[in-house]
Amino acid sequence: MTLTAPTATIGLDTAAELAAQLRVDSIRSSTSAGSGHPTSSMSAADLFAVLATRHLRYDWDDPRSSANDHLILSKGHASPLLYSLFRAVGVISDDELMQGYRRLGQRLQGHPTPALPWVDVATGSLGQGLPDGVGVALAGKYLDKQPYRVWVLCGDSEMAEGSIWEALDKASYYQLANLVTMVDVNRLGQRGPTDLGWDVDAYARRAEAFGARVLVVDGHDLTAIDNAMTTAAEPSGDRPTVILAKTVKGRGFSEVEDSNDWHGKPFPPDMAERAVRELGGERNLKVRGPQPEPSAVDGSSPTSDPAARPVTTQPTEPPTPARYDLGQKVPTRKAYGDALVVLGAQNPRVVALDGEVSNSTYAFEFARAHPGRYFEMFIAEQQMVAAATGLAVRGYHPFASTFAAFLTRAYDFIRMGAVSGVDLSLVGSHAGVEIGPDGPSQMGLEDLAMMRAVDGSTVLYPSDATSTVALTQIMAVLPGISYLRTTRGKYPVLYPEGESFPIGGSKTLRSSDQDQVTLIGAGVTLHACLAAADTLADEGIRARVIDCYSIKPIDDEAIAAAATTGRIVVAEDHRAEGGLGSAVKDSLVTAGRPTPSLTHLAVRGMPGSGSSKEQLAWAGIDADHIVSAARDLMRG
Amino acid sequence: MTLTAPTATIGLDTAAELAAQLRVDSIRSSTSAGSGHPTSSMSAADLFAVLATRHLRYDWDDPRSSANDHLILSKGHASPLLYSLFRAVGVISDDELMQGYRRLGQRLQGHPTPALPWVDVATGSLGQGLPDGVGVALAGKYLDKQPYRVWVLCGDSEMAEGSIWEALDKASYYQLANLVTMVDVNRLGQRGPTDLGWDVDAYARRAEAFGARVLVVDGHDLTAIDNAMTTAAEPSGDRPTVILAKTVKGRGFSEVEDSNDWHGKPFPPDMAERAVRELGGERNLKVRGPQPEPSAVDGSSPTSDPAARPVTTQPTEPPTPARYDLGQKVPTRKAYGDALVVLGAQNPRVVALDGEVSNSTYAFEFARAHPGRYFEMFIAEQQMVAAATGLAVRGYHPFASTFAAFLTRAYDFIRMGAVSGVDLSLVGSHAGVEIGPDGPSQMGLEDLAMMRAVDGSTVLYPSDATSTVALTQIMAVLPGISYLRTTRGKYPVLYPEGESFPIGGSKTLRSSDQDQVTLIGAGVTLHACLAAADTLADEGIRARVIDCYSIKPIDDEAIAAAATTGRIVVAEDHRAEGGLGSAVKDSLVTAGRPTPSLTHLAVRGMPGSGSSKEQLAWAGIDADHIVSAARDLMRG
């Protein structure tokens, strides 16, 4: 990988001019908006100017080109700097910069999002841009097999986030020489000095210990920056590169340089005027750096359609779709693994990640069948979701799995994935008290609430192998964040092969015209509902049973119909707040029809250890408790 | 700090015997339970044996003694090892170990919890025990000012969690020489080799770069371990110590040593028999190590009652309780800061932490008034909540604050805090779209759903300064995890000083006998509800207005009364799932009374930038939308 010819065409004098313009425009845009972070932009302006003019290989007219380098602003609050660059390369107008920034309905948001075609991922929750960049770099090296580089600008404050170190750990483990992290060490956070201040040596020791090649520069010395970026593009023994740039916050405007009083504050107009004057006035430089090299693509031409590019890794052997006999006992987590193997064979853009529990989630089946498309993330759930986000940016459809409980570790990343608008699937195994003796630390009991609250999410909770396979298949083409909850234990197959499970649907497994009560379950409690219905039938009570496998969206029609039975028992292996019962109640109330008597069985209090059967009984969500609840409603 | 006399009384030969017994008992207990992690226990048995006999200063008969060292099993799945140690020191019986482990209703759970008096914090979600230990060590050094040490046993797999590096970063920043991290580098995780395998040098470089003194040992060489632990107790220039112990998983039983096939699996009885035989048979050694030194406590005697010990740091100046005039515009986040200052003066056990945004959350007011009880956690939300948990273990009441959005980063830690049963308060500022131009990355929109699903939590969302102050006061004595949601902007004070705000209550601000509709809000939407009621009144529509400041528990009585108005509009600055509307609907349906027509206004879709007013209008949760919704219900 060497620098391309166009790199040399723009001199550092032009870069210096650009840096001044970026500073001026960062000030102008934030003052115009009345909010924003000019000083955090100014410290990194020299880095951006040298990068954009001489190193970033990017076709600004074709942001979708798969040959482009990637630029991720991990310190998302420095959005004025990024948008000022967009103006300088001519993709947004000065009018948009001055009148669109931070305004309602405009794409130049306070923190960057992919509403802008030149932005890969939403940033603004610190410590996420670099982990996301690891995902893009994984795609570049292992899947796209393209020579593009991923350039990430981090702030120094965000180096305190553990996720940064998860990212560097994975970057060195996966030998991501295509990843360049630039750290803007301006020593000042929002409220004061950072943990390490200007101790760039301390950062250097840490980054080196995590396997990076480290280059330390004066972040305002354009020649030094240029040399570092040139080195960053040279072979590094497959190490990722970290450029530590010692900088001054507010650099270029003497009134605010290295001041602790100007974080996240636009300059008042008079001050902005003085600043622009000190920086040499407004400029209208239009400048673009090197283009990506079409010839650099392995044998084939780059294309703007990522879906059209081949993935060279093929399954080691053609997978045989698993068949399940009715009544056969199969864990849904196993069915997920089976389904993922087949999906991987059908769809070369399906990839999988797991947090070191693939033998529990059954993601290992995919890893075995499609090793080139499986990424082990070890015990780093934040990085797992971020890598999935980065892979999704490149047009892959990731399935990321761990215990449902441990997805809570990545909630901020899941939330930000929704802001990024990526399509990715999460799978949480070992849901609920059903897991048995391992105890509450391993029980996913909050996952449904957490996932339902994610904007645009789909939340699925199948009860048998057939529905798990069908839903896994659908997830690969669902927009946004989708979530599949799987169960540890073995339960009987309820549905024949080929049965369809539309999103937003449900299955009514028992019903008659004389139903006196409806039992609603999902996952493990559905089996309890079926057993309860049998017991109730023996007592002459007719119970409808609904498998609510689609928790978001929920089957409003089936719930409304259930309401006409006058009595509903909902049982779920989850906290009482925000899960299946909450979804059912939302549906009932929203419908505005007379609501039935309803008993909501859920996990209340803190479980301990015990067998699966004991735990379900303890929580009051087994067949016996459902029967009792139904009987009580009949009496009520 | 030097080792106490009793240390020398137990020889390494006894430690070797103890190590064998710990291995045998780890095998016996897990085989007896039919589940558990014997091999993960066996790799660390030598570390535990040397620690417990010669270095851990602990009065097993008085686990509440404030002079005791602390022992935290960060690799919580090695619970057989811990429980076997409890048997060896004579605090649990062999019967309990053999018949209680992992059984229903028993305290020897699959992963340790404080149901056992010798356990500080629940572990089992990896990468949390060390961050929790940082909190205990902070208490020891800065608040208790006691010479106790905090010993944490980590697994090597969990070193992949970023939270471990957040912990070491803070441990070195706060110069926690009283913290000793032992890493059991057995090279094998659940599903295979770890990221770094047996590369202890790589771990050493990382830990050193993060500011620790590192000691590398053969984890099965008792003399080497003993020397390292002796060194760990010596002055370290205020650096925390990390002992990296190269170990063999399953050590002591040749059939499973260093095998990848035996993670998390008990041995079948015949195999267990062979293992016990190879280890020299069952033992009944009873052994205890050094006692804590009463004389070591600064001038005073140690006491079993942490609340009785003085906190020496006093406020720099006596705080003046803030007064707010009715109608005065005050941000609730500011009122929180004001209240916390007063609370800190009243209660010396109140401490505060913040994630580098204290000038936004107003925690800086506490930091200024009570600097000795404020801990800056920089941008490391996981560590912030873990440190709060560790401080709570020592009897302090922590208030930990950041943007509501960024508490999602710590959800796994919050969930585990509930399993630990600690009392701590979380405060999330900048809730909802109300924040305005910064955009969705900074908006807390999922926090209510997340916090409601935490077992035993209390969720509060005040709308004015008076109620914020009252609720902050109450939080300091609430059990479990409590959460206060604050708002960025200024809104009028609604309540006079001295008004009381009981948990589970609400305030009805407008009502009459002829109410035709009830408007329910909290926080910013309460003000919109009030404005809407005025508009509706002008149109001749009588609207009741309820301030639902207590979202969990919610005021079921007030909601039931509201239902009798026949129509309810709920407006919340949060996602439609799991928040205020969900709590209201849960209450309505659970009551089993006829439900009213209800319109739920919430944030649907992805916001961008814009002013606060524009955002509230965009989301459809401002006064105009509430008026429209009420009108529509009147027509319906």
Image (tube, coloured by chain):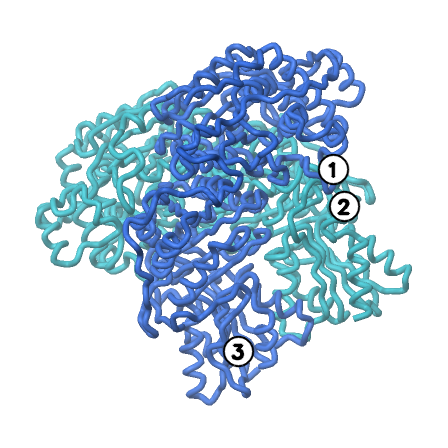
Chain colours: A blue, B cyan
Give the spatial CA distance, label 1 vs label 2: 38 Å
Image quadrant of residue B47?
Answer: top left
Any part of residue A202 in sight: no
**Label 3 crowd bin: few (<14), some (14–19), many (20+), radius 10 Å:** many
For disc 2, the marked residue is: B497
Looking at the rendered structure, which numbered label has been put on residue A103? 1
Q: Provide residue B446's location: percent of width, then percent of height.
A: 59, 49
Task: Name the residue nearer the viewer: B496 or A262.
Answer: A262
Left or right: A430 as drawn, with respect to B540: left
Position in image of residue A34 (x %, y %)? 76, 30
Asked if B298 appears above or below B66 in the picture, the reply is above
Mark 1 lies on a secondary structure that is: loop
Can residue A336 be seen at all in this image of the molecule?
Answer: yes
Question: Foreground: B58 or A413?
Answer: A413
**Location of residue A179 by image quarter:** top left
Residue at position x 78%, y 61% from top?
B629
Direction from residue B189 to residue A407 in the image, left or right: right
